[in-house]
Amino acid sequence: MKNDFKKYRLKKGYAESSIRVQNSHLRNFFAWMICNQKTVETIGYHDIINYLSDERKKSVKPAAIHKRLQLVRIYLDYEMEKGTIKENPANRIRLKDRQETALFPPIDKTELDRIYREFAEKEPKTKRDKRTHKRDTIILGLLIFQGLVSGNLKRLTIKDINLTTGTIYIASNRKSNARTLKLESVQILSIHNYITQTREAIREDRTGENHLFTTRKLDERISIFIRRLKKDYPEIQSPGHIRQSVIIGWLKAHPIRQVQYMAGHKNIRSTERYRDEDINDLTQQILKFHPIR
């Protein structure tokens, strides 16, 4: 096995020096499995969590814990490619030692739809407020129905919207893949009215002639909007929280590879962490590896 696993890692681009370091940690992992009566066929998600927890008790630093987890992933990927196991449980583990956003309880699709509908139906009093409300309704729809985040919204252009086919194109960037998503029927008329009537009337940024949103400091504007929204809907934490909820909802309705495409994830592991049945495990993991004090 040792030589075959080495060939596997060399093929994946790992250097000889990295493999030597990995091998010492791999021997430690094998020893842990023997002590805990685990085999590659029987080891599961919670077993790996326990292994990492035992390593932490040895005062292993967080960065090294992440490397231990990465090595376990590599090894179990190798065993999966061989056909020894059907699934790699390490792929579903995300540690919270690094400063990442904690997972909040997801908001279900029915509730998100209600929030959008109630917000869209509001009637601001002043002409100016009516215009900004139309823009904010478009933003909220793109957060709730397409799971976009501020970076996506900043890069959107008018050409990315196809009202004839009822779709929106999200360009790729360093972190995500390009994708074309369906617009909901409730979005189409409001987007059309915004583009043809409202957008030019509230234009602030003359440099972005083709941008869908021409508001200066759009990130800041979205943050203000979400803070105001939270007053009426305190269950909302952030645009990222909305996206988390949307992806979890998608996973209930679509195959995971389709959700990977819809979310723009470059790696299937990014999609797997949103599996609904794992949210409670992930919450416990956050408390276990990064307790709130």
Image (cartoon, helix red, strand yellow):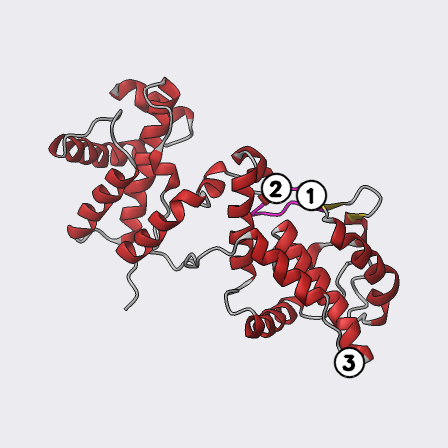
Mark 1 vs mark 2, CA separation in Å: 7 Å
- Dot 2 falls on a residue whose secondary structure is helix
Residue nearest the viewer, comparing 222 with 77? 222
Q: Position of residue 92 (x, y in %)?
A: 38, 40
Q: At label 2, which amino acid type do we have?
A: Met
Q: Which label sits on residue 262?
A: 2
How far is mark 3 from mark 2, CA to CA?
37 Å
Side of 18 relative to 27 (left or right): right
Mark 2 burial class by Cα count in 10 Å: few <14, some 14-19, many 20+: many
Residue 155 image point, x, y percent: 70, 55
Q: Point out the stretch of residues depicted in magenta.
A: 169-178
Marks 1/2 in contact by CB < 8 Å: the verdict is yes
Q: Is residue 134 above or below residue 85?
A: below
For the point 36% across and 43% down, the residue is 93
Residue in the foreground of this view, choosing between 281 and 264: 281
Residue 125: mark? 3
What amino acid is found at the position of numbered circle 3 in the picture? Lys
Whether residue 218 is situated above or below residue 24 in the rendered picture: below
**Neighbour class for label 1 at 10 Å: few (<14), some, many (≥20)?**
some
Contact? badges 3 and 1 (CB < 8 Å): no
Q: Quadrant of the N terminus?
A: top left
> In the rendered image, which residue does mark 1 sit on?
181
